Image (cartoon, rainbow, N blue to C red):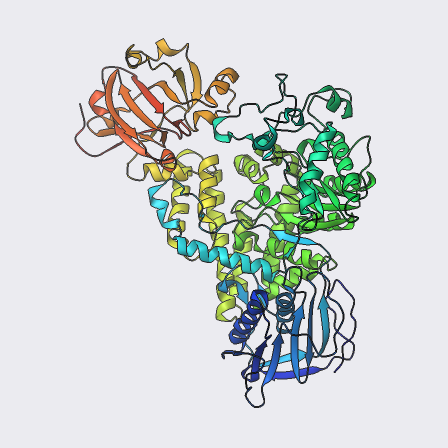
């Protein structure tokens, strides 16, 4: 028996290795007698994959159980004979010998050592690939006889924490989109929870885990704890008070309040809160809460280093480095390996201009609004390093900004390269937010990023091949498919325009900016889809296993879907409706087969008007012509509820021209357009009560004699409709979810055909939650007896 010491941070093969043939039918798994849940799961995963590969059930036995004659034992959770070396956190070791195999590792810290050993063995020796969560994402070669390479191996993570966060949570499915016909896209709670479990397992298979080095918003509960007794802890706001500033109704929470970083008692309180837990965690977070309203006291302002012409808040890093350094120094007095964690986020993103960072500070960098550019990120990481930061933690939101859509972007190498830059500059943790669930579109990017976290030393091309090997004989064609989007679209067209696109999307939301501007630019072309479809057809012509063909079919369907999205998002008017109708029909046919995050995707399209999905839903039961009511209507709040008594519904559009103006495609608490008066936006931010919308419509003559209705995209909480001063219908909802559900109100009995325009008035009453007309209004008709 031989055990050799190997190079850390990598999977390494011993020099004296030899090939060993083992029939799967001879394999038995020996589970450690003292196995706990992680070791039991490791044994179950080994059995699952060996059974898939060999086509025969592999048993799990207790150590004392009698083994079949001639069996080959695979010991899980048991150290190999002769290996007495201590294990570090998360370390995995596995040994392959003629007489058996051993899979074991760290059990004290996180317990996943044996599990990680099993996964590394399955990948490196048996060629297993996990292209996406769930059984359908497992790629493997069927083999009755395993070709094993003997020797001792080990893996020790370079990063203390590695994670791409989950996109879904147990018992918390995505909210319904709001269209009755899309209810079929919703999963049952059982189906949803099964996907949650699959995602958790995929994270483990990618060897994600470890301990997050602090970070995050540190003061979310401070107002509740100290607001009454220690108001001096908190920011001096613009009104000269140390208390929360009231927020819009949709964000009412004291968790956004800021503290006073210049107050030394804040540092003392952070230390006092940490001391009872210092044996549990070595990290103390000092990150400011989310939102605005930073401290404006003289002491905090004196800590800031502002460039000429720079407005407040601008750059606030120095004031928070000041606080964090105090905490770091005090923490060292109690625990030598303690760290304070600074949140480099928005106003604190860029390095301090005057101060240096204490050596026991972890800087958690959140590049929230900056574009996915190598030059910007390189300077950001280097700048913090030059400011004294020896340990960085990367916490991007790139998935939300770049991987939320259904068009292929080709960003996988860009994501990889920025991660590598972070590692080169001292990153010890990677915590990405979050998996978006569009595996057939962005699966390669997630796969390569996850593998790079586990083994940062390997180049992009290694992991690119690693992923494509999951498609068997079609590996080269699949690689060419992804490379086309990366080289011809991302590198040649999108990356040169990244600033323009990001600015258009606001807050760095690249995909939103892309979809809003795609029809006016040459970012994508029909030829792109022709070329990539051809590559996938060539892949489909290869001799593939049923599982490989199923994985390839996901790419084929996703590319067809992307083509339809492209057409629907670039077309105009009636053509846009028709293209979106074809897109919707495709989704209805394939949503049970193509594994995309349907509720999220369609919800984004609807919310940001990327395609005409809502129009297709609303108009599908009505023949043309369709008339889209004006987007912005005359608007007046009615907090004293006097409008009914004063008969505002009898007014004309001309008589309401002095009213405010408000869009009809969003809750009034979320009014954002330039036409809406800022003072009105402030009043509406927390408004519950009545309000009136007024407009006028010309009814097409061809609708005469038909049943004519106004189609509303949603309302919160109830409305009454008046046409030419006459009530024509009402509608109300019982829940927040119902506020975005379409409904129709008939108007033809009140139409005066002798008039050129009809006066349309809507009274909306909001009792709680969000209020207003939430989506665009359409005028339509259908066959039937209408008022002449």
**Nearer to us in this view, 504 or 359:** 359
666 lies above or below 582: above
Camera sees residue 336: yes
Q: Residue at x 74, y 64 (%)?
A: 10
Left or right for 368, reference 520:
right
Number of marks in the image?
0
Percent x, y for residue 646?
A: 29, 10
The extreme bottom residue here reads 69
Q: Residue at x 77, y 22 (%)?
A: 302
**Nearer to us in this view, 539 or 738:** 738
Percent x, y for residue 559?
A: 50, 53
Question: Which corner quadrant holds the N terminus?
Answer: bottom right
For residue 592, what is the image quadrant? bottom left
For residue 392, what is the image quadrant? top right
495 lies above or below 671: below
Q: Residue at x 28, y 32 (%)?
A: 744
Percent x, y for residue 353?
A: 80, 31
Camera sees residue 344: no
Left or right for 36, reference 390:
left
């Amino acid at each position: 028996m031989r055990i050799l010491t190997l190079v850390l941070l990598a999977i390494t093969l011993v020099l004296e290795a030899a090939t060993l043939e083992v029939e799967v039918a001879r394999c038995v798994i020996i589970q450690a007698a003292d196995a706990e849940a992680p070791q039991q799961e490791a044994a179950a995963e080994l059995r699952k994959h060996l059974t898939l590969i060999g086509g025969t059930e592999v048993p799990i036995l207790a150590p004392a159980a009698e083994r079949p004659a001639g069996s080959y034992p695979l010991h899980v959770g048991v150290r190999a004979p002769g290996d007495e070396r201590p294990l570090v956190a998360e370390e995995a070791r596995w040994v392959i010998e003629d007489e058996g195999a051993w899979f074991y590792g760290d059990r004290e810290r996180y317990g996943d050592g044996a599990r990680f050993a099993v996964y590394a063995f399955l990948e490196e020796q048996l060629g297993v690939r996990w292209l996406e969560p769930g059984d359908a994402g497992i790629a493997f070669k069927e083999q009755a006889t395993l070709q094993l390479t003997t020797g001792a191996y080990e893996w020790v993570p370079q990063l203390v924490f590695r994670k791409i966060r989950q996109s879904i949570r147990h018992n918390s499915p995505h909210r319904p989109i709001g269209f009755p016909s899309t209810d079929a896209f919703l999963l049952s709670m059982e189906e949803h929870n099964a996907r949650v479990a699959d995602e958790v397992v995929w994270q483990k298979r990618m060897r994600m885990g470890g301990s997050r080095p602090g970070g995050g918003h540190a003061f979310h509960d401070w107002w509740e704890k100290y607001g009454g007794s220690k108001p001096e802890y908190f920011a001096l706001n613009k009104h000269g008070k140390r208390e929360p500033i009231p927020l819009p109704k949709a964000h009412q929470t004291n968790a956004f309040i800021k503290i006073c970083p210049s107050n030394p008692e804040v540092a003392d309180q952070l230390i006092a809160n940490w001391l009872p837990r210092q044996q549990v965690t070595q990290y103390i977070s000092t990150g400011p809460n989310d939102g605005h309203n930073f401290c404006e006291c003289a002491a905090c302002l004196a800590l800031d280093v502002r460039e000429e012409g720079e407005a407040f808040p601008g750059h606030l890093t120095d004031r928070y480095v000041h606080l964090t350094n105090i905490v770091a120094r005090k923490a060292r007095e109690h625990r030598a390996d303690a760290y304070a964690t600074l949140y480099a986020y928005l106003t604190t993103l860029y390095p301090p201009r005057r101060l240096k960072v204490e050596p026991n500070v972890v800087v958690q960098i959140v590049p929230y609004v900056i574009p996915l550019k190598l030059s910007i990120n390189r300077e950001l990481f280097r700048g913090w390093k030059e400011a004294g930061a020896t340990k960085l933690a990367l916490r991007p939101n790139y998935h939300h900004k770049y991987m939320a859509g259904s068009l292929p972007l080709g960003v996988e190498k860009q994501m990889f390269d920025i991660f590598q830059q972070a590692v080169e500059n001292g990153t010890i943790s990677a915590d990405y937010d979050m998996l978006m669930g569009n595996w057939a579109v962005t699966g390669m990017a997630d796969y390569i990023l996850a593998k790079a976290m586990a083994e940062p030393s390997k180049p992009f091309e290694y992991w690119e091949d690693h992923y494509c090997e999951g498609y068997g004989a079609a590996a080269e064609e699949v690689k060419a498919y992804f490379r086309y989007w990366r080289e011809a679209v991302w590198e040649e067209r999108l990356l040169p325009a990244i600033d323009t696109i990001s600015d258009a999307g606001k807050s760095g939301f690249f995909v939103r900016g892309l979809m809003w501007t795609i029809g006016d630019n040459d970012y994508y072309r029909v030829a792109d889809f022709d070329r990539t479809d051809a590559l996938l057809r060539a892949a489909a012509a290869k001799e593939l296993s049923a599982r490989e063909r199923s994985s390839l079919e996901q790419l084929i369907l996703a590319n067809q879907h992307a083509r339809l999205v492209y057409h629907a998002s670039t077309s105009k008017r009636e053509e846009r409706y028709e293209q979106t109708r074809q897109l919707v029909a495709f989704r209805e046919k394939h949503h049970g087969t193509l594994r995309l995050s349907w509720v999220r995707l369609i919800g984004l399209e609807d919310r940001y008007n990327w395609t005409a999905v809502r129009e297709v839903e609303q108009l599908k039961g009505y023949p043309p012509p369709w008339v889209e009511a004006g987007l912005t209507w005359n608007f007046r709040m009615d907090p004293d509820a006097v409008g009914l008594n004063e008969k505002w519904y009898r007014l004309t559009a001309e008589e309401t021209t002095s009213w405010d103006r408000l869009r009809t495609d969003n809750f009034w608490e979320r009014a954002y357009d330039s036409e809406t008066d800022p003072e009105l936006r402030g009043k509406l931010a927390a408004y519950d009560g009545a309000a009136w919308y007024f407009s006028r419509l010309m009814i097409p003559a061809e609708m005469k004699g038909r049943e004519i209705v106004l189609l509303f995209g949603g309302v919160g909480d109830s409305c009454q409709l008046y046409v030419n001063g006459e009530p024509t219908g009402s509608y109300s909802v019982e829940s927040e979810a119902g506020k975005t559900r379409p409904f129709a109100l008939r108007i033809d009995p009140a139409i005066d055909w002798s008039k050129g325009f009809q006066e349309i008035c809507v009274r909306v009453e909001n009792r709680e939650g969000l209020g207003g007309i939430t989506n665009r209004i359409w005028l339509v008709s259908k066959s039937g007896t209408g008022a002449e």
